[in-house]
Image (cartoon, rainbow, N blue to C red):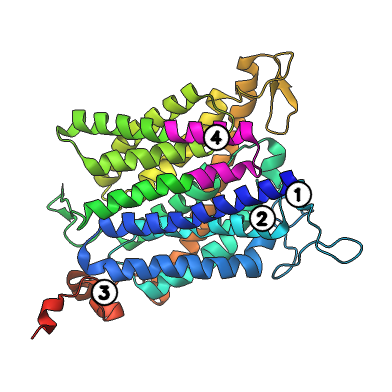
Amino acid sequence: MELFTTNNIWMMICTALVFFMHLGFAFLEIGLTRQKNTINILFKNIFIITVGLLLYYLVGFNLMYPGEFNGFIGFSGFGLEAPLTESGTLDLTYNEGYTYWTDFLFQGMFAATAATIVSGAVAERIKIGPFMIFTVLYVGLVYPIAGSWKWGGGFLDKLGFYDFAGSTLVHSVGGWAALVAVCLLGARIGKFKDGKIQAIPGHNIPIATAGVLILWLGWFGFNGGSVLSADPELTSLTLVTTCLAAASGGVFSAITSTIMFKNLDLTMFLNGILGGLVGITAGADVMTPTDAIVIGAISGVIIVFAVSFIDKLKLDDPVGAIAVHLVCGIWGTLAVGIFGFKPLTNDAGEFLNADGNVVASTLDAANALSFLPQLYGVLAYAAICLVSSFLIIFTLKKTVGIRVSELEELEGLDAYEHGMDAYPDFRLNEH
């Protein structure tokens, strides 16, 4: 019982840390965009976490963890119904390590993240009403169905696909939708002029920096809690690999951007940290510290080239969400297959999968067996996310419209959609 309580406490702490990440996302997004849209961005972020939790209670949790199902889609009922013992009391041995309520709340904190990723990519020009409709459909239905394919014991789980904490299940799910939304929405006015890329600086880089550091802190819960227990060996390894990948991603992103653009770009440094975090998330519990540094370093380099490539395609992503969450999410997922499950071996030196079953006797064989399921997983999530997000956003575009007017965009969404100013000049009220 003492261990059970310890596991629950650790999971609850991690839940709080993942919740705190939403402040980090909000700070990053407002910091990298313009002052005139601050209220709009904060409103979207608050809407996502509040409605996301309610939707996850109503349908999401039971879509994502339906129990016995066909491996593609299942539903075990509306709302929450805690498992009971034969005597009718709450069964505290749910999942052997933590309670049903702890599981719901921890998983619920992940659910809203996918829409938060999209929010950053479409900032400063999307109508808030259609964005809210998109959030309800994507977080309420698409994310949990996709999540069930692996975390709910679906067909990808049976194939051996591995995604420890969501490089694909969370980050790429948001990243694919962000890509579709940016394509359908178009660039901000002034971003591309006469065929040239024009920088649109964020209005508060200190706030953006604080946001990244908050996200890094939150990732202790994001990855650390995904161990689903307070196991000292796995949690400590997970936190070490997470931090090393973040540090490596930031450093190598800064070095690469400095070489390419001849300036010390803080925003690239920050996105490199996030890229390293996203990259390690799929395999944080099965990588060595050295592997984590390599994965983070490659993530950091990828970020610089991905941001530049996205700009060349004339896709406007104000916060670099597609490069961070989609591109590095794909890389991190494939990296699990490339690096293999090295820490997971038995006394005979045989290689094990995440469930402790022997999969190969040599490293090359283990890597070969683990790469193809990772590739299948990436392709499967690309398919469901691209199709579903396109259907939702394209339908909204053709019916109610998804983009604000030119006047609203130029003067700012705060005034037109909210009638508020994030930084009112109180001196106007002085006598």
Q: Residues within 10 Å of mark 1 (few under 14, many from 20)?
A: few
Q: Where is residue 221 in the image (x, y as percent from the top left)?
A: 52, 47
Q: Where is residue 62 in the image (x, y as percent from the top left)?
A: 69, 62
CA–CA distance in space, label 3 to label 1: 46 Å
| Residue type, mark 4 in image | Thr
- Which callout, 3 or 4, points to the residue nearer the camera? 4
Q: Which of marks 3 and 1 is in front?
A: 1
Q: For mark 2, what is the residue?
A: 103
Q: How crowded is mark 4: few (under 14 residues within 10 Å), some or many (20 or more)?
A: many
Q: Compute the Cα span from label 3 to label 2.
A: 37 Å
Looking at marks 1 and 4 on the same chain, the residue that comes earlier in the sequence is marked by 1
Number of numbered discs: 4
Q: Name the residue under label 4.
A: 238
Name the foreground residue: 88 vs 116. Answer: 88
Tell me, yes or no, whether the two marked residues, 2 and 1, touch with CB atoms within 8 Å. Answer: yes
Q: Is mark 1 on a helix, strand or loop?
A: helix
Let me know if residue 66 appears in the view. yes
- The tag on residue 414 is 3
**Which is more N-terminal, label 2 or label 4?**
2
| x then y, percent, for residue 419 | 26, 81
Magenta includes 22?
no
Q: Is residue 102 left or right of residue 239?
A: right
Q: Which residue is drawn at 15% across and 75% down?
A: 425
Looking at the rendered structure, the secondary structure element under dot 3 is helix
Q: Name the residue under label 1.
A: 95
Lower position in the chain sequence, tag 3 or tag 1: 1
Label 3 vs label 4: CA separation?
41 Å
Mark in the foreground, 3 or 2: 2
**Residue in the picture at 66% in, 55% down:** 103
**Which residues make up the magenta segment?**
220-244
Coordinates of residue 95 in the picture (x, y in percent): 75, 49
